[in-house]
Image (tube, rainbow, N blue to C red):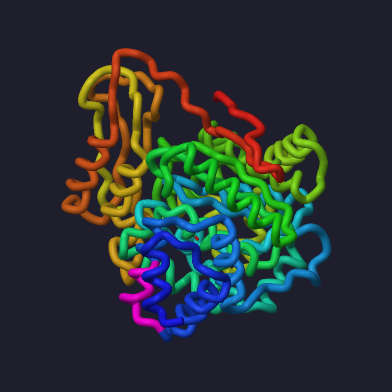
Amino acid sequence: MQFYDIIAKKRDGDALTNEEIEQFVQDAAQGSVPDYQLSALLMAIYLRGMTDGETARLTQALARSGDTVDLSSIPGVKVDKHSTGGVGDKTTLIVAPLVAACDVPVAKMSGRGLGHTGGTIDKLESIPSFQTELEGQAFLRQVREIGLALAGQSGNLAPADKKLYALRDVTATVGSLPLIASSIMSKKLAAGSDAILLDVKTGSGALLPSFEDALALAGQMVAIGRANGKQTSALITGMDTPLGRAIGNSLEVAEAVEVLRGGGPEDLRTVCLALAADMLQLAGKGDPGACLSLAETALSDGRALAKLRAVVAAQNGDVRYIDEPSRFPAAPHKEVLYAEQEGYITRMQAQEIGAASVLLGAGRRRKEDSVDPAAGLLLHKKTGDYVRKGDALATLHCQARAMAAEAADRMRAAVCYSDTKPAPTPLIYARVNKDGTLSYLKET
Ligand code: URA
């Protein structure tokens, strides 16, 4: 079939056959179709959607488009985690060492920041000399020896997804449920773990802001994981407000270390413990209560922090920055933003705050940009806090005063006030388990 006919079929709302999906993914991986035709097909999928069957087939075709990782030489149930992306989301830096400290191997491949959302690899690279590129055998050896590796996606893992993702990023086709589900799950299947925990974000800072969409995305990814023989579950967590108080690469590493030392913001700690407990449950470590208490113990007795330190040392990073995060170079320009009125903060829109952090240099505006490890924001107040006019809301960190003006405007516009205290928003909305059901809704 001509590529033109595949585009036309999807444009008209018809389901693609397995052969058509295989063909388009192969063409994407081999570069044998021009970007304008691939982009047209992506837009047709964005507008017309895909059936569950098409999405499952697309996931498998993307996963098979390149190398797959074989973790079978590592004993135990290997558990992976993936977040759909958020602002201030440094959970991997805390959860992966926490789970590995409970003797569950974690072979984690992470990504860089995307749009207004941050990425684990950019955060890790703010630790001087930390190596995020680990070649196959070194990656496996490290997981075998210390139970944890935190690396960038290996060069040829799901290359068709890499191609499609780069096009989606610049053609306004990121926020599509079948495209997100297949993109994430193809990489998780290719990365070889036995079990997968998905952290699906909901709220203004999420790729799919509505709770209904988050629930549908979670259900679909859990079904795909299980159909491919992987224990898979999902937590739906809030991303209306940034997680924790730090947004920006080295600022977030420092905050993650604070949590691993037993302190840090309560929202971040709560979400991390819930994610870790669910990963331990997937690894067969016991019922939810037992797994939560395993995670709490590994956090409070310092084993999780020791595991992060071991990973940083193994990947050639300078562990003095973990021992003393105050060593991270401070940004040359710091600017405090003050509350413009008195009242309760009813909203701090994560997407706008993420966009402000990008303007400060913590993320990329174009693919080829580099990130400034010291740039970002520290929030002094969060949703639900009462402020008086002139109270410090946040401190912006960047290279020069001129960079702060636009970010400050975005940040101010992200904050809403009221005389009435807002109802608390949930941190953890729901768990989607093997039956695709919502098992709880938690107020925090
Ligand atoms: N993360 C991915 O890897 N892919 C998406 O499509 C969205 C988030």
Q: Quadrant of residue 276?
A: top right
Above or below, 213 against 159 in this view is above
* Residue 295 shown left or right of residue 387 in the figure: right
Residue 409: x and y in percent read 20, 41
Instruction: Say which residue appears at 40% left-offset and 53% top-offset.
Output: 175
Residue 232: x and y in percent read 69, 51
Magenta residues span 33-41
Instruction: Say which residue appears at 48% left-offset and 37% top-offset.
Output: 211
* Residue 3 shown left or right of residue 110 in the figure: left
Q: Please name the predominant secondary structure of the magenta segment in the image.
A: helix
Can I make out residue 282 in this image? yes
Instruction: Say which residue appears at 80% left-offset and 72% top-offset.
Output: 73
Magenta highlight on residue 258:
no
Can I make out residue 273 in this image? no
Residue 231: x and y in percent read 73, 53
Q: Quadrant of the image for the C terminus?
A: top right
Above or below, 159 against 301 in this view is below
* Residue 122 shown left or right of residue 358 in the figure: right
Q: Quadrant of residue 48?
A: bottom left
